[in-house]
Amino acid sequence: MSEEERCVIVRVGEERYAFPIRQVREVVSTPSLTFVPRSPRHVAGVMNLRGQVLPVVDLRKRLNLPEEEKRERKVVVADWKGEVVGLLVDEVEAVGEVAAAETEEEVRGESWVRGVARSGGHLVVVADIVSLLGEESRGIS
Amino acid sequence: MESLNASEEEIRIFLEEVEEQLELLETGLLKLEREGTDPEVLASLFRAAHTVKGSSAAVGHQAMAAATHALENVLDRLRRGELHPAPGVVSVLFRTLDVLREMKADLAEGKEWTGDLGPLLRELRQMAETPGILAEAGIFFDEPLEEEVAERLREGEAQGLVPLKVTVRLAPEAIMPAVRAYQAYEALASLGEVAGSRPSLEEIEQEKVEAEVVFFLLTREAREGVRAAAASVPEVLGVEIERLGLSPRVAENLSAEEPGSPSGAAREASLGGGAAGDNRTVRINVEVLDRLMNLVGELVIDRTHLARLSTLLGRFEEAEEEIRELGRLSAHLARVTGFLQDEILKARMVSIDRVLKKLPRLVRDLSRSLGKEVDFEIRGEDTELDRSVIEVIGDPIIHLIRNALDHGIETPEERVKAGKPPRGKLVLSAYHRENQIVIEIADDGRGLDAEKIRRTALERGLLTRERLEEMTERELWQLLFLSGFSTAREVTELSGRGVGLDLVRKNIEGIGGRVEVDSHPGRGTTFFLYLPLTLATIRALLVESGGQVFAFPLSGIVETLRVTPGAVKKLNRREVMEVRGKVVPVFRLDEVLCLPSAEQGNGSGYAVLATAGGMETGFVVDALLGEQEIVIKNLGGYLGEIPGFLGATVLGDGSLALILDVRGLREPLLN
């Protein structure tokens, strides 16, 4: 019943996620990250995006996925409440139309999951970036 | 907003203009309240109300136009001396100003103002219509007039006639000047009433007439009609017409209101306001200035790197011509960038008056509600500061002012008991000192209570008794700025929320400034804000720790020391170092920040001795990388504020380095 939406499909480990392209600004390859002490565990650090400080969230840590030794790294730059926040992923696989099928409550689990879709032979979780990142600031006050 | 017939850009300009005019209104009302009727003050009040009326009508803000129209009518009566600025009157005017501010704030947020204007309008109208409390002679007309004439003009004006001064110049060769003068009198009298003339009618009849005759005319006729009538008299060379009773500038503004004035409609519709006529200045969006400043900041940093590179290249004795050319170019670029930076800095300077304007009203309202009597004085209001600094210091200044009124200055009874005059004194001074701007806020109140501060610090477990005993008074005062420290005897609505001074300190230190306080029991307290001239770039010391580069703002560094093994000693389970006879707590930066690659420190490296709030702390780092000019960028809303970091800066290789905040680093360590 959901309408088709153009999405960026990313891979993190064995998992695939689709982010609505209207929430994505751009994708950056091989970012140089600066670690930020005292920041939450899932924050990978900050990077220089054309002179702007871009906080980058490690999607793997945010989703509690197992760590891997070697990984490709790409940053999906997304809109977040009038600012930009980066999501560190292993690979950006495709951009395409995705229709999120309705899912059972158990599969949905979290509020940021909008549904599940099939793309390129894989099941992908269609995610809402803003609710994935949370409405509130992540800083420690 | 759909309800207004103006574009977003027009509304932006409108809001800016209204803000300026509302500030003028406020300044004027405060003066009116304090000093009573002053023609200049009333003229400026009238002008401000009139301007807002015109521009709000032009953008279609009906409520604001209605309120300012009613306000204008009251001010007009005050200006003519028909109404006395009694406290009741002034307080209605202040209330009107508050309503206008609300309207402006709502518009700025894109909301429609939904208040009820009815009661206020009724009050204003009533004041505008109260029958004549006539002015003392002289203050109404800037023209020295015979009392009879002045009286008649006032009455005529009250009946809706416009008082005009018509100057008729006669040809010098005129054979019968008295006859021409009389003809002019008759021509003007046919348009209304001639209340008087110079020379008088009797003198004209006695032929005592020179080249110029002045008539005081009450009329409903438009200026052009008056001019035509007077000019129709033979041997009249020129006719000048002036509206009476106002300073020339007000008269000019008012021409829009005169019946039949062709420029009226156009003037009402103009949005540009006072700035329109001045083609030597342009209004520029602050965001554009900010972007320019950021770009120049980047340029300054690139300049530094380029200079370093070309010095490196130039070291080769037999440098090639191209390399020497590069060196020359780099030097030239550095010079031009420097000039560019200076000019943009200048463009961003605004007078601190912008922030201070609101204060007299604040002091007035607050001291009243606290039952205190306070004389407030501002010195150096024309001191200039970078716009970005101005934006940050507003809240801290207001906070310190509130603090002084709330806790510093005593009630009149207490003051009299202490042998002081019942009225307290609060002085804010702003001035340049070396490369800084200093703002002093001094009250003559009760002063700080050292004993009470010691007790509170002990109760809150902030410091040990021994440490507190050995602290100087000046050091004790600094404790006020620690988070959660508040000695306010009662929590008042104003400033006793316990988040007071530490926030002031945070704001000021956040822009690379410093707060200090000095106090004498019974004689008063003075707060000093030391502010940087600009926030564009700061000088910083780059250090390496745990494999990462960090920047210490140079303003907080006392010195750097080489740490030899054994120099760091344990004292009371804390690591300390002795620096020139002083024992300073020392921390390893990588441990403080729990850096993942922190190695077990062997105590060697370098110590950066930093100060904040009058206390020194040493941070041991692996290497000192040198000083550099850096641009502060904040970490963004997602990360929010992380204690210990002011932000980040872009290094020469494009990577980011975090800028350290000494106080934030240290605070969790000392508790």
Image: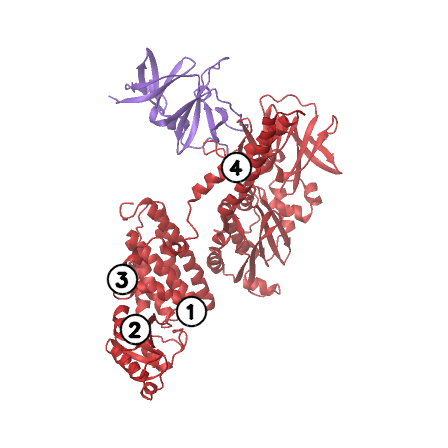
Chain colours: A purple, B red
Residue B369 horizontal side relative to residue B47, left or right: right
Q: Can residue B631 be seen in this view?
A: no
Chain of the residue displaying label 3: B
How much space separates mark 2 and mark 3, taking CA atoms? 24 Å
| Label 4 packing within 10 angstroms: few (<14), some (14-19), many (20+) | many
Amino acid type, callout 3: Pro
| Residue positioned 33% across, 59% down in the render | B68
Q: Residue at x 34, y 61 (%)?
A: B50
Label 2, label 4: how many angstroms apart (C-alpha)?
A: 61 Å
Secondary structure state at the residue bearing disc 2: helix
Kind of residue at disc 4: Gly
Q: How far apart are marks 2 and 1 (CA)?
A: 19 Å
Amino acid type shown at disc 1: Pro
For discs 2 and 3, the disc positioned in front in the rendered view: 3
> Would you place residue B508 above or below residue B584 in this image?
below
Please state the chain letter of the residue tagged with numbered disc 4 in the rendered image: B
Of the two numbered discs 1 and 3 in the rendering, the one whose residue sits closer to the viewer: 3
Q: Are marks 4 and 3 on the same chain?
A: yes
> Which residue does the numbered mark 3 point to in the structure image?
B262
Q: In this view, does A5 lie above or below B9?
A: above
According to the image, label 2 marks what residue? Answer: B158
Q: At 30% across and 60% down in the image, what residue appears?
A: B119
Looking at the picture, do discs 1 and 3 lie on one chain?
yes
For disc 4, the marked residue is B297
Q: What element carries label 3?
A: loop
Q: Earlier in the sequence, mark 2 or mark 4?
A: 2
Q: N-terminal of the two: label 1 or label 3?
A: 1
Who comes first in sequence, dot 2 or dot 3? 2
Q: Where does the image place residue B392, in percent across and percent down from the top left?
A: 50, 45
Q: Which residue matches tag 1?
A: B39
- Nearer the camera: disc 2 or disc 4: 4
